[in-house]
Image (tube, rainbow, N blue to C red):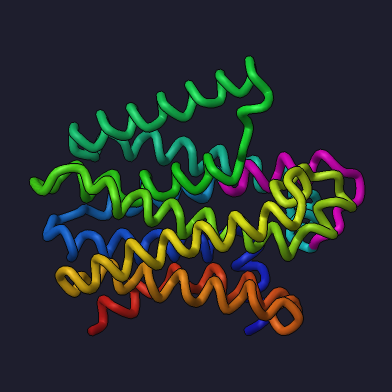
Amino acid sequence: MDHFYKYFRWLSLDIVLGAIFFLAFLEKYFQVALTGHVYFALGAAIWLIYTADHLIDARSVSSPSTGRHRFHLRYYSSLIVIGATVLCLSLVNIYFLEGVIIRNGALLAACCIGYLLAVYLVRGLWVKEVLVAMVYALGVYLAPFSLSSQGFPILPVIQLAGVAFLNLLIFSFFDQNTDKSDGFNSLVLRLGKTKITVLIWGLSAALVVTSVRGVITNGDQLQWLYLVMTAVLLVIYLSPKFFNQNERYRTLGDGVFYLPGFLLLL
């Protein structure tokens, strides 16, 4: 079972599953009806982004330090073929999506491309962790927001991006030795432990304050969810010795995104 889950994580399928759970929760929360095509579009987009990132990282070093990157280097050609197939299926899938979802998705893609072009011109703007967190949050909320009459949920989107960013910061904190060995320019290595510690605590405080305010105001289930997710991530950060064993920090850290799935059972 552990062997299976290891490959499941290496292929970023845990990230995809977490996003699917969150989307299902938001479908119920916003009281909209989403088709299977929407779920496929989100899952495929997230898998392609994460897999492309891992393939680029794996190809950039001759002998990767982590099992995930060694796996992607070993099966590089096969993953390229699978990725191309998923991309083609995703393009066909667009035909079956609602027009408003396509329009908003195109707008999100245009913003991402614009940011990448800006990064190309001004290298100092590149903060991969921020981009990944924002795209993840906007991608998860895109379809429910597009079909809902409640308006754009600015705060919940920012909160989800904050939780995703906190997740990436903590992972980067645990991965700093392997990142340094492989020459990856992670945020922890760029800013240093002191600034990252301040950033983690500041972001956590902002998430806790906004979530508690939402809970006190109307007992919002979504705010309870953000509060618990933040608390779990902080527990991981405060117990590095325990969670560094067998990459427990990844198992539980990505596992927090399964929580919406459990709430659906209540």
Snapshot quadrant of residue 99: top left
Q: Position of residue 116 (x, y in %)?
A: 56, 25
Residue 223 on the magenta span? no
**Which quarter shows the C terminus?**
bottom left
Q: Position of residue 110 (x, y in %)?
A: 40, 24
Q: Nearer the viewer, residue 102 or 30?
A: 30
Question: Does 205 appear above or below 61?
Answer: below
Is 144 on the left or on the right of 66, as rendered? left
Q: Nearer the viewer, residue 128 or 47?
A: 128
Question: Does 43 appear above or below 221?
Answer: above
Q: Residue at x 41, y 62 (%)?
A: 207
**Which quarter shows the N terminus?**
bottom right
Outermost residue, left side:
149
Disc tally is: 0
Q: Residue at x 67, y 27 (%)?
A: 124
Q: Position of residue 166 (x, y in %)?
A: 54, 59
Q: Residue at x 56, y 70 (%)?
A: 253
Question: Does 236 appear above or below 10?
Answer: below
Q: Residue at x 52, y 40 (%)?
A: 131
Q: Which residues are magenta?
A: 50-66
Q: Position of residue 238 (x, y in %)?
A: 64, 77
Residue 53 on the magenta span? yes
Q: Nearer the viewer, residue 144 or 227?
A: 227
